[in-house]
Image (cartoon, rainbow, N blue to C red):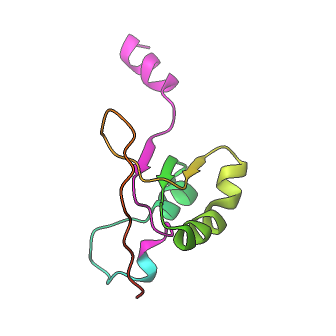
């Protein structure tokens, strides 16, 4: 076994980071062929680990329901905040539109 393959075997499962995850199952409201695999499918089907942020309280409740079992199993972490690459925390208004 080479050092590379030995190291690769020790890597954790792929981590998905979605800063505005919505309800985590995009296929329910996007047309087919968009080329987007929803976070729910990546975690359920492929075993990815996920960090999902959703700052809208109503939408976060849907996200929490969809990922409840995955959070309990340690495969998903949810946060009611947006995730950005900024070096410090930012408080900004959030605007939402009803469908």
**Nearer to us in this view, 71 or 87:** 87
List x then y, in percent, for residue 93.
37, 62
**Nearer to us in this view, 23 or 96:** 96
- Which residue does the image show at 50% across and 47% down from the upper left? 51
Q: How many marks?
A: 0
List x then y, in percent, for residue 26.
42, 73
Residue 99 lies in magenta, yes or no?
Answer: no
Q: Which quadrant of the structure image shows residue 29?
A: bottom left
Residue 7 lies in magenta, yes or no?
Answer: yes
Q: Horizontally, is 86 left or right of 22 in the view? A: left
Q: Which image quarter is the N terminus in?
A: top left
Farthest-out residue, top: 3
- Which residue does the image show at 61% across and 69% down from the upper left? 61
Q: Which quadrant of the structure image shows residue 31?
A: bottom left
Q: Which quadrant of the structure image shows residue 7?
A: top left
List x then y, in percent, for residue 49.
53, 45
- Which residue does the image show at 37% across and 45% down from the upper left? 90
* Vertical order, 71 against 41 (above or below): above
Farthest-out residue, left: 34
What span is colored magenta in the figure? 1-26
List x then y, in percent, for residue 37.
38, 65
**Nearer to us in this view, 11 or 63:** 63
**Nearer to us in this view, 88 or 21:** 88
Q: Which image quarter is the C terminus in?
A: bottom left
Q: Horizontally, is 9 left or right of 68 in the view? A: left
């Amino acid at each position: 076994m080479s050092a590379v393959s030995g190291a690769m075997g020790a890597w954790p499962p792929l981590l998905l980071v979605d800063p505005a995850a919505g309800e985590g199952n995009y296929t329910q409201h996007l047309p087919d062929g968009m080329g987007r695999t929803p976070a729910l499918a990546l975690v359920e089907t492929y075993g990815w680990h996920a960090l999902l942020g959703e700052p809208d309280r109503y939408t976060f409740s849907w996200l929490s329901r969809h990922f409840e079992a995955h959070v309990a199993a340690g495969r998903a972490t949810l946060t009611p905040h947006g995730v950005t690459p900024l070096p410090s925390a930012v408080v900004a208004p959030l605007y939402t539109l009803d469908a």
